[in-house]
Amino acid sequence: MKFSVFIAKRYLFTKSSNNAINIITLISALSIVAGSAALFIVLSGFSGLKDFSLSFSSLFDPDIKVIPAQGKAITFDNDTAEALQNIEDVAYYTKIIEERAFLEFRGKNHIAYIKGVDENYLKVNPIDSTLLYGSWLAQDEPVAVIGFGISRILSLGVNNYNDLLRVMVPKPGSGQITDPLQAFNSSQLVVSDIFQVNEELDQKYIFVNFNYAQQLLKYADTTLSALEVRLKPEADPISAQEEIQRLFGDQAEVKTRFQLNDKLYKMLNAENLAVYLIFTLVLIIALFNLVGSIIMIIIDKKSNIKTMHSMGASLKEIKKIFFLQGAMMTVFGGLLGLIIGTLVVGAQLLFELKMITPTLPYPMQFTIMNFVAVFLTISILGVLASYLASSSIRPKLLED
């Protein structure tokens, strides 16, 4: 083994007398370095984009959400509230009343979701970090916090007490509507602040205090649209979900944050896998250069191979020399590419070289998982390519 390693190192780091082989070997090495660096940079970029996309859901979506299994409402009485608070994994919970609403301001209209929240909402969902002015809801005043998109559509600012925002929601009940004016409950609000997350959410929600939403929608004290729960940091979401589900029974459906955004998670994971497979294919094509390079070296070292065989080296040992040469070229090239990729990712994180907008740098994330995945990928493919190239040595070569 020591003999094979020694000769493989000599062949790897010593130039050939044939300049064409040196060029081919250099191209092969650069392909490995560039391929591993590119794969690591792209995977780091997609990891950053994934976290960036999911950061919006962490602002709006709680750890656990209890929603009606059927209809629009669930029952939440004092006994249920006490039992929920006694669950060990539960840190905070907040009561939610939500309904589609018609908004009107100075002749401009927009349809959004009015979301009534209680004083615990910010403990469950840290949306206050997205406020433009820092004024959250007062629980005893008819005020609202609207999305930036709604503000833009309605040309609506904050603390305008002369022109109020009108909110209209359908009245509960059934039967035929004879007078459209009597089909809605209506009220007026002052906008106290504006939040900005992304285009979809900014146009979708208007936050009001819980009591206001309860009165506007004529909900009973024990009736809610949903219940949002924040778990303790060490809590297991699955076990907490099962315990809360047992508490509410068949009337409600309990979902984790992952289940609330399962389509988004699946889409991001599918994109990440697709990019990985595409760049792995590029690496496979690049490693054909390695196979060609090793075969050219074998041809160039034909006389040396005969000499080593005459001195007692077996065919297996000779194959091992060129196998180790290719494997070492792959490992060293892959590590160099990973170092270059790490420097590029680090430069983006520190110096924000690439910007999406004037204030938003392209998100990147360095993860050990990506580093290990790229190293294992390039190593496994390189070992297979080296084995394929070294297998070209036949007994006939030693006899010619």
Image: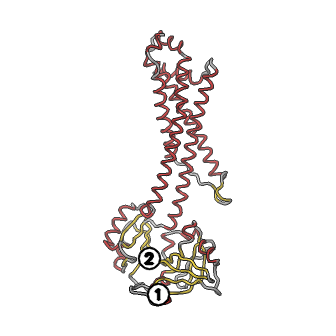
Name the residue at 41% across, 78% down.
Answer: 224
Q: Nearer the viewer, residue 180 or 346?
A: 180
Relative to 112, residue 330 above or below: above
Q: What residue does disc 2 label?
A: 95
Hey, what amino acid is under mark 2? Answer: Lys
Which residue extends farthest right?
358
- The residue wearing badge 1 is 183
Q: CA distance from mark 1 to mark 2?
A: 26 Å
Name the kind of residue labelled 1 in the image.
Ala
Residue 68 vs residue 208, the one in the foreground: 68
Numbered disc in front, either 1 or 2? 1
Label 1 packing within 10 angstroms: few (<14), some (14-19), many (20+)? some
Callout 1–callout 2 Cβ contact below 8 Å: no
SS at mark 2?
strand
Q: Quadrant of the N terminus?
A: top left
Quarter assignment of residue 262:
bottom left
Direction from residue 265 to residue 138 in the image, left or right: right
For the point 43% across and 69% down, the residue is: 229
Residue 68 at x, y percent in the picture: 38, 73
Percent coordinates x, y for residue 209 in the rendering: 51, 80
Quarter of the image where one finds residue 72: bottom left
